[in-house]
Image (tube, rainbow, N blue to C red):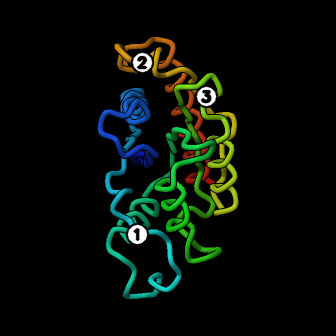
Amino acid sequence: MSQTRILVLVGSLRAASINRRLAEAAAKTAPEGVELAIYEGLGEIPFYNEDIDVEGKVPAAAQDLRDAVAKADAVLLVTPEYNGTLPAVLKNGIDWASRPYGAGALKGLPAAVISASISPNAAKWSHDDAVKALGVAGAEVVKEASLNFATIGQRFVETHPADDAEAITQLAATVNLLTQAANARVNA
């Protein structure tokens, strides 16, 4: 069996972001034969504009994202909540990966969303907006793989999520469900 590739898009660009640390911890839970690769470069992609989404003129950073999504067997989004919704950089990535309309790299691709915030709301608004955007973009959202972390500013201030047994168990469950969906798609 070939390697299952899960591309991870992190909505926070901050190097010390707890959302990034959750993505790193999720990557450590990947079983043998599964690779979780955190995508670098979301912040380099220009805002989606159909005027620059022209064959032969697509910005290199946007094409790199499209290529990475096209090579993936599944996509995992890890998102904070900015002003009650998902970060612009993550929505922009979804927009670029959804084009060309009806045939973008996200079409039919299994996807899951992990959200985390400092509030007790656990970034559920951002989570719901990400699920909605992925679904409209044509991804097959694995809702059972959803995961929400609340009050992360307290929970993970001194502990990396990789050192939190409960978080690791939850992240591993999300990765396993997403892997199952990816393998079912490949074997269909």
Q: Earlier in the sequence, mark 1 or mark 2?
A: 1
Describe residue 44's horizontal placement relative to residue 9 as left or right.
left
Query: What SS does tag 3 mark?
Result: loop
In the image, is 105 to the left or to the right of 17?
A: right
The kind of secondary structure element at disc 1 is loop
> Residue at 66% of width from left, 35% of height from top?
124
Examine the image and state in which quarter residue 21 appears. top left
Residue bearing mark 3: 122
Q: Are marks 1 and 2 in contact (CB under 8 Å)?
A: no
Q: Amino acid at mark 1?
A: Pro
Q: Tell me if mark 2 has few (under 14), some (14-19) or many (20+) residues whose alpha carbon lies within 10 angstroms of its own.
A: some
Q: Earlier in the sequence, mark 2 or mark 3?
A: 3
Residue at 43% across / 13% down in the picture? 164
Q: Position of residue 173 (x, y in %)?
A: 56, 26
Name the mark on residue 15: none
Q: What percent of the width, then of the height, locates residue 57?
A: 37, 86
- Residue that protrudes farthest toward the front in the picture: 83
Alpha carbons under labels 1 and 2: distance apart: 32 Å
Please, what is the three-letter code of the amino acid marked with disc 3?
A: Ala
Residue 54 position (above or below residue 157):
below
Q: Which residue is mark 2?
A: 156
Q: Could you tell me which secondary element the residue under label 2 belongs to?
A: loop
Query: Mark 3 or mark 1, which is nearer the start of the sequence?
Result: 1
Q: Is residue 139 above or below residue 158?
A: below
Distance of mark 1 from mark 3, alpha carbons?
A: 28 Å
Q: Is residue 28 above or below residue 106?
A: above
In the depicted structure, whether residue 62 falls above or below residue 188: below
Residue at 55% in and 65% down: 95
Q: Which residue bears the numbered disc 1?
A: 46
Quarter of image, res 23: top left
Q: How many other residues sit within 10 Å of disc 1, few (<14), some (14-19) or many (≥20)?
A: some
The three-letter code of the residue at mark 2 reads Phe
